[in-house]
Amino acid sequence: MEQFSTEEQQVEAIKQFWKENGVAIVIGAVIGLGGLWGWRYYNEQAIQAKEATSKGYEQVITALDASDDGFSKVSQFIEANNDSSYSLFAALQLAKKAVDVKDYAEAAKQLTWANNHATDTNLKNIVGLRLARIQIQQQQYDEALATLDGINDESFAANVAEVKGDVYSRQGKIDQARAAYSLAIEKNAGSPLLQVKLDNLAAVSA
């Protein structure tokens, strides 16, 4: 480093340094502080938006059971927040309510929307199983099988096989139903309901 013998030389050197680099330093500092402020502002806005969405979700779900226009309020919430996970939960709640009043078309609509928008694999598989069961209620058996074929996670294999068995049983395809239920039992040996379903096929085919 260059040595300065007097304070005057040091002062002159500092002046020269600022003359050559001062603008760049100031601009860098402004950009840095501006970026930091912008990031903090963005985070604060994101947190506030999530809190507002959470509060809105709670309000419309409460309205679903408490008011006559609950269905429309939840539908509006889903449309307004379709990029939020809360919209998925709202769609599932709306589908459940629709099933309670035996509006299977509405339930299928909401579950189809949720199935198309879910990004979490486990949630998507759960939604797919629910949708397939609703499609069975609508006697849309081919659609139900297609929905089930979209679930490839081995941890859901028993559930998929069971619901496929339900489809084949409804269609009167006893051999295919028996094979599906047997596979489900193989994948989930601890389910007594599966054995009951399999045993009932024997009575149907007798």
Image (cartoon, rainbow, N blue to C red):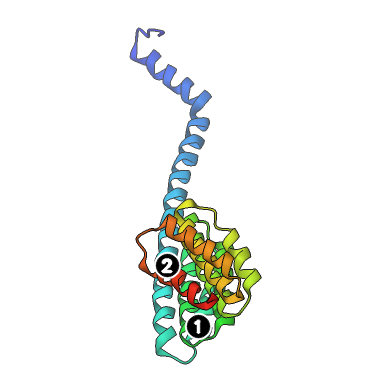
| 44 relative to 202 in the view: left or right | left
Q: Is residue 118 visible?
A: yes
Q: Residue furthest bottom?
A: 68
Residue at screen point 57% across, 76% down: 170
Residue at screen point 46% across, 69% down: 198
Q: Residue furthest front?
A: 206
> Which residue is the site of mark 2?
194
Looking at the picture, tell me which residue is in the foreground, 67 or 185: 185
Q: Is residue 30 above or below residue 147?
A: above
Q: Is residue 82 visible?
A: no
User: What SS does tag 2 mark?
Assistant: helix
User: What SS does tag 1 mark?
Assistant: helix
Give the mark, 2 or 1, whose residue is nearer the N terminus.
1
Q: Which mark is residue 5?
A: none
> Which residue is the site of mark 1?
98
Crowding at dot 1, Cα within 10 Å, few <14 / some 14-19 / many 20+, comes out as some
Quadrant in which the N terminus is drawn? top left
How far, Cα to Cα, is label 2 from label 1?
Answer: 27 Å
State the image coordinates of residue 163 (x, y, percent, origin top left). 51, 67
Looking at the picture, tell me which residue is in the foreground, 55 or 147: 147
Verify CB contact (< 8 Å) between mark 2 and mark 1.
no
Residue at screen point 42% across, 67% down: 194
Disc 1 marks a residue whose amino acid type is Ala
| Count of numbered circles in the view | 2
Disc 2 marks a residue whose amino acid type is Leu
Crowding at dot 2, Cα within 10 Å, few <14 / some 14-19 / many 20+, comes out as many
State the image coordinates of residue 158 (x, y, percent, origin top left). 46, 59
State the image coordinates of residue 99 (x, y, percent, origin top left). 49, 82
Residue at screen point 38% across, 58% down: 189
| 143 relative to 10 in the view: left or right | right
State the image coordinates of residue 118 (x, y, percent, origin top left). 53, 61
